[in-house]
Image (tube, coloured by chain):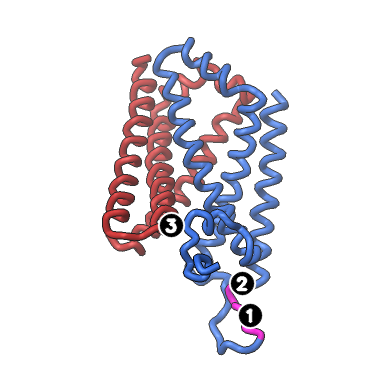
Chain colours: A blue, B red
Amino acid sequence: MTERMSNREGLKGMANPTRYGLERVAYWLQRLSGLGLLAYLIGHIYETSSIVNGKIAWDKMLELTQTTQGHLILTLVIGMCVYHTANGIRVMLGQGGIGVGKPGQPEYPYKAASLNYKQRLCIWVSIALAALAMMYGMAVLFGD
Amino acid sequence: MRESIIMKIHYGTALGAVALVTIHILFRMTQNFSESLQYQNVIANYHLLPYALMLEVVLILLSVHGFNGLRVILLELKQGIVYEKLINYGSIGAMAALIAYGSRTILMAGMGMS
């Protein structure tokens, strides 16, 4: 409790998406999807580098990645990519002062203008777009 | 460099990457997905100079954006002069290494050195 009050929870605190509402969940998903996408980028660059070793090496790599598990990972990557993009645009616009409301006198019950329905709607739309993209991706990947 | 400028670079690289990654994905959709991944098709993509140049730009944009994002997360987690220096230089090093490794693939495949 003392540790929590002193704001020194570290990684545990960062990994906890609860306590602060939907915006906190959006922040948590943005971080998580960012890390996932960075890991995928590194893996993808390593995977594609096998092409310089010739056709046999490339086909061997495809045998590893073009599997059900590989397609499931790719579907997850599609979802992370779409969510990260859509929510990232929301954050960018918010930092530019768009869609966060006008500053005003703090009055009871002290509702922050920045945490308005537009922001919440954008978060839900980002999640919905990610889900739709994942479904489309699955149809393409498993439809082959 | 000021953090405000770094954040502008972060957002700029994000917007650029979104546009170019869309083209990269659309290239895979020009034909059946598994067909598009066949060796000859992928090599043909690398031989197409505008596409190879676009891949290089995507690589740079995503590496800068990705490792700067990781840097921001790590700096939020802990602070300190030595730690911050380590994270800043470590991110730049990792970014450069990934760009160099990816560029090697683009260059070698594009020049037919496989």
Give, as a three-letter code, the residue at label 2: Leu
Chain of the residue under label 3: B
In which quadrant of the rendered image does the C terminus of chain A lie? Answer: top right
Name the amino acid, label 3. Leu
Q: Within 10 angstroms of label 3, few (less than 14), some, or many (20 or more) residues?
A: some
Kind of element beneath mark 1: loop
- x and y, in percent, of residue A6 in the image: 47, 69
Where's residue B9, x and y in %?
Answer: 37, 55
Q: Name the kind of residue labelled 1 in the image.
A: Lys
Q: Secondary structure at mark 3?
A: helix
Query: Which residue corresponds to mark 3?
Result: B77
Residue B12 seen from this side:
no
The residue beneath circle 2 is A115
Q: For marks 3 and 2, give the CA distance.
A: 24 Å
Q: Judge from the rendering whether residue B14 lies leftward or rightward of residue B82; answer left or right.
A: right
The mark closer to the camera, 3 or 2, is 3
Alpha carbon of mark 1 to alpha carbon of mark 2: how far? 8 Å
List the residue tagged with mark 1. Answer: A111
- Quarter of the figure that contains the N terminus of chain A: bottom right
The chain identifier of the residue carrying mark 2 reads: A
Q: CA distance from mark 1 to mark 3?
A: 28 Å
Within 10 angstroms of label 2, few (less than 14), some, or many (20 or more) residues?
some
Name which residue lies at 60% across and 47% down. Answer: A82
Quadrant of residue B36 within the rendered picture:
top right
Relative to B71, is A127 on the left or the right?
A: right
**Observer-nearest of B47 and A37:** A37
Q: Are marks 1 and 2 in contact (CB under 8 Å)?
A: yes
Instruction: Give, as a single range, the part of the protein colored magenta.
Output: A109-115
In the rendered image, the vertical position of residue A122 relative to residue B70, given as above or below: below
Contact between labelled residues 2 and 3, with CB atoms less than 8 Å apart: no
Residue A31 visible within the image: yes
| Residue at image point 44% right, 27% down | A46
